[in-house]
Amino acid sequence: MNPIYVAIDVAVVILALRSLMVLGRRAPWTSLGWSATVGYFGAAAWRYAHTGPQREVMLAAEGCFVVLAAAFLVAVVRDEPQAEPLMWPSRIGLTRAEKRR
């Protein structure tokens, strides 16, 4: 067990859930990315909280990582709004197009 890694992973899960609460359905690909982030870091916290091989947890984490990378990439290309500020989201930020105006 590695309590420092577990604490960091749980903190990222809380941040991702907060981002999901702020975004709602306004940015579907970004929300999918944050949902996959919850899955990835939740699996990582589980893995670091236990000892021994955990093949299923590792496969779930890898699958979530692929989904979160793809979802955030699509969200950037589509120029979806993001939850801001980064450390504790409280509002939906402007898109790049809105910032240029």
Image: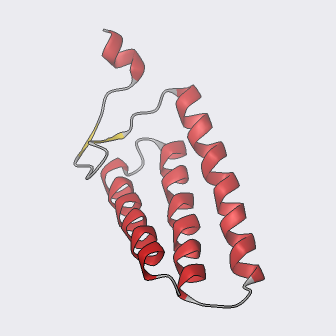
Q: Residue at x 42, y 75 (%)?
A: 4
The answer to whether 9 appears left or right of 88 in the picture is right
Q: Quadrant of residue 59?
A: bottom right
Q: Position of residue 18 (x, y in %)?
A: 32, 59
Q: Position of residue 3 (x, y in %)?
A: 43, 82
Q: Position of residue 53 (x, y in %)?
A: 74, 86
User: Quick check: 12 above or below 85?
Assistant: below
The answer to whether 4 appears left or right of 48 in the picture is left
Q: Quadrant of the C terminus?
A: top left
Q: Residue at x 72, y 85 (%)?
A: 54
Question: Which residue in the rendered view is the most extreme toward the bottom?
Answer: 51
Q: Residue at x 66, y 68 (%)?
A: 61
Question: Which residue in the rendered view is the most extreme toward the top?
Answer: 101
Is residue 46 or residue 5 the one in the foreground? 5
User: Quick check: 42 above or below 67?
Assistant: below
Is residue 90 or residue 57 the one in the foreground? 57
Q: Position of residue 17 (x, y in %)?
A: 38, 63
The answer to whether 56 appears left or right of 21 in the picture is right
